[in-house]
Image (tube, grey):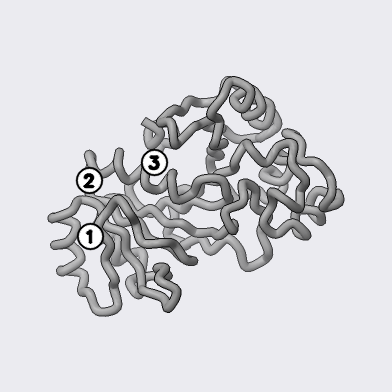
C-alpha cells in the first residue's frame, strides 16, 4: 500500500507540489479508512470529492462531524465557495484530530501542472502536520520550464535558468532539494518503463527517500536510489 511506503501516521499529513495531489489523497484515504476514520480537507481550494461523502462545514458541530465519520469512515470537508470548490474548514486541525484518526490536507495549488515552485506564502502547511509529502509528475521532464511549472519565474530564480530551458531530471531534484519543504517525495505518472527510469534518475539526485508511482494504475514502490 502506498500509505505504508510513505509511512503515513495518525494525525495531520500535508500534501504539496503538483502532478497528482488529489489522486494521492483519495488513494491514501481509500487505504487508511480500513484502519480508522479519515478527513480529507484543504488549506487552499479543492473540488468536492467524487468518491467520498462531502461535508459542507459552515455550521456543522464536532459531535455531528464525528457522527458523519462513524457513518462514512471517510469524508471530504470544507466551506463552499462561489465557484463550487471547497476551501479551508472553520474547524482547527486540533479539532479535526480529536474526531478523526487521519487528517489528509491538500496544502498547495499547482494549476494542474506537474512541477511547482513556491512563493514565500506557499505552501499553506498546517503547523499540526506530522508529515509533508511533495508530489511531482515525471511528465515535466523534457518540457519547457514555462510549460510544465507553476510559479515558473520562481523556479527560474531558484534554478538560475530561463523559462525556455528544457526540464531535466537534475533540475527537478534541484528544485525539490533547494526548497526542502518535504519529508518524503512521491514521483508520480510513471506509467511506462521509460518513465520509471526517468523517475529513478530524479530520485538519485534527491536527498530524501522517494516513492515512484503510477497512482492511476495502482502501482508504487520505493526507489532503489
Residue 99, labelled with which disc? 1
Residue that mark 3 sits on? 8
Q: Residue 58, how many percent across, how many down?
A: 29, 78
User: Which secondary structure lies at badge 1?
Assistant: helix
Q: Does 15 sit left or right of 141 as displayed?
A: left
User: Which secondary structure lies at badge 2?
Assistant: loop
- Circles 1, 3 touching at the beta carbon (< 8 Å): no
Q: Residue 204, how many percent across, how many down?
A: 67, 27
Q: Residue 60, how many percent across, how many down?
A: 22, 74
Residue 63, labelled with which disc? none
Q: Residues within 10 Å of mark 2 (few under 14, many from 20)?
A: some
Residue that mark 2 sits on? 36
What's the residue at 41%, 76% (across, down)? Answer: 81
User: Which secondary structure lies at badge 3?
Assistant: loop
- Circles 3, 2 touching at the beta carbon (< 8 Å): no
**Residue 14 shows up from this direction:** yes
Nearer-N-terminus badge (2/1): 2
Amino acid at each position: 500500500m502506498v500509505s505504508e511506503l510513505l509511512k503515513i501516521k495518525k494525525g495531520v499529513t500535508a500534501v504539496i507540489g503538483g502532478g497528482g495531489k488529489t489522486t494521492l489523497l483519495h488513494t491514501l484515504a481509500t487505504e487508511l479508512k480500513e484502519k480508522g476514520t479519515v478527513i480529507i480537507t484543504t488549506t487552499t481550494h479543492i473540488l468536492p470529492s467524487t468518491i467520498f461523502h462531502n461535508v459542507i462545514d459552515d455550521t456543522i458541530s464536532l459531535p455531528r462531524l464525528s457522527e458523519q465519520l462513524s457513518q462514512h469512515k471517510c469524508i471530504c470537508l470544507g466551506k463552499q465557495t462561489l465557484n463550487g470548490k471547497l476551501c479551508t474548514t472553520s474547524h482547527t486541525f486540533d479539532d479535526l484530530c480529536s474526531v478523526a484518526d487521519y487528517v489528509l490536507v491538500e496544502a498547495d495549488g499547482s494549476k494542474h501542472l506537474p512541477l511547482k515552485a513556491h512563493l514565500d506564502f506557499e505552501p499553506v502547511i498546517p503547523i499540526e502536520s506530522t508529515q509533508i509529502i511533495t508530489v511531482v509528475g515525471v511528465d515535466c521532464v523534457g518540457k519547457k520550464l514555462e510549460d510544465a511549472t507553476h510559479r515558473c519565474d520562481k523556479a527560474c530564480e531558484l534554478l538560475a535558468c530561463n523559462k525556455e530551458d528544457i526540464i531535466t531530471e537534475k533540475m527537478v531534484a534541484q528544485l525539490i532539494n533547494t526548497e526542502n519543504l518535504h519529508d518524503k517525495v512521491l514521483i508520480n505518472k510513471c506509467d511506462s518503463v521509460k518513465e520509471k527510469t526517468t523517475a529513478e534518475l530524479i530520485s538519485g539526485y534527491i536527498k530524501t527517500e522517494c516513492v515512484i508511482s503510477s497512482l492511476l494504475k495502482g502501482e508504487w514502490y520505493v526507489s532503489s536510489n
